[in-house]
Image: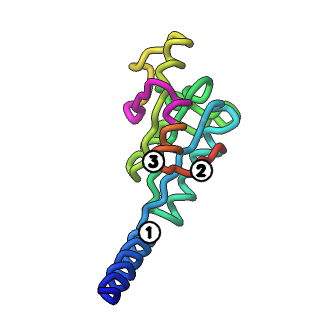
Amino acid sequence: MTRFLRLLAASAALSFFAAASFAQDKVVYHIDDYETQATKGLRNIRNHLDVAPETRVVVVAHANGVDFLMDGAKDKKNPNIDYASLVSALKARGVRFEVCEITLRNRNLKKDQFSMDAEFTPSGVARIGQLQSRERFAYIKP
């Protein structure tokens, strides 16, 4: 019986390590100021996916960070950078973009002011916490 238990334990350990080796990386990018973070963050995400394309990426925006997801948004320092095309390209690669609904209420913004690529979450800060604690996402703030 002891040999059976050792084999069972060894099998369980191998299964655990095999599953861990196939685990998908998960990252939440936190944007709360689009002027200083949006262009840099979108570039970071593109580079991240170029070297690790299987990574699951969620971008959570709140406060002034939501502005880059609004229809017609452009980089203030470089107006040639159109956020909609950058966001759409990343969305096509599986990136989720979530906008804080508390920010919408506080700033009197409407959901129809945002890109079709944007999704909404009741609280940006709570969502980041959930992704980190419950779903084990790594946290990046560009």
Please report whichever mark, 1 or 2, sits nearer to the chain's N-terminal start.
1
Q: Which mark is residue 20?
A: 1
Q: Can you say whether 73 is above or below 6 in the image?
A: above
Residue 44, given in percent of the width and then of the height, sits at: 60, 52
- Residue ID at (44%, 20%): 113
**Model colouring:** rainbow
Looking at the image, is mark 1 or mark 2 nearer the viewer?
1
- Residue 20 in which image quadrant: bottom left
Foreground pick, 4 / 45: 4
Residue at point 40% right, 36% down?
Answer: 117
Q: Identify the element where label 3 is drawn.
A: loop
Task: Kindly report which numbered mark, 2 or 3, lies closer to the viewer in this rendering.
Answer: 3
Residue 47 lies in what quarter of the image? bottom right
Quadrant (top left, top right, bottom left, bottom right) of the C terminus = top right
- Label 1–label 2 contact, CB within 8 A: no
Q: Which residue is mark 3?
A: 135
The residue positioned farthest toward the top in the image shown: 108
Q: Position of residue 128 (x, y in %)?
A: 53, 37
* Furthest residue in direction front, as rendered: 1
Mark 2 or 3 closer to N-term? 2
Q: In this orientation, which residue lies closer to the viewer: 126 or 102?
A: 126
Few, some or many C-alpha atoms within 10 Å of disc 1 (few <14, some 14-19, many ≥20)? few
Q: Which residues are magenta?
A: 116-127
Find the distance from the CA under tag 3 to the CA under tag 1.
Answer: 15 Å
Horizontal arrangement in the rendering, residue 11 relative to residue 114 (left or right)? left
Q: Badge 2: how crowded within 10 Å, few (<14), some, or many (20+)?
A: some
Q: Secondary structure at mark 2?
A: helix
Residue type at mark 3 is Glu
At 55% from the left and 12% from the top, the residue drawn is 106
Q: Amino acid at mark 2?
A: Arg
> How many circles with numbers are drawn on the protein?
3
Give the numbered dot on residue 43.
Answer: 2
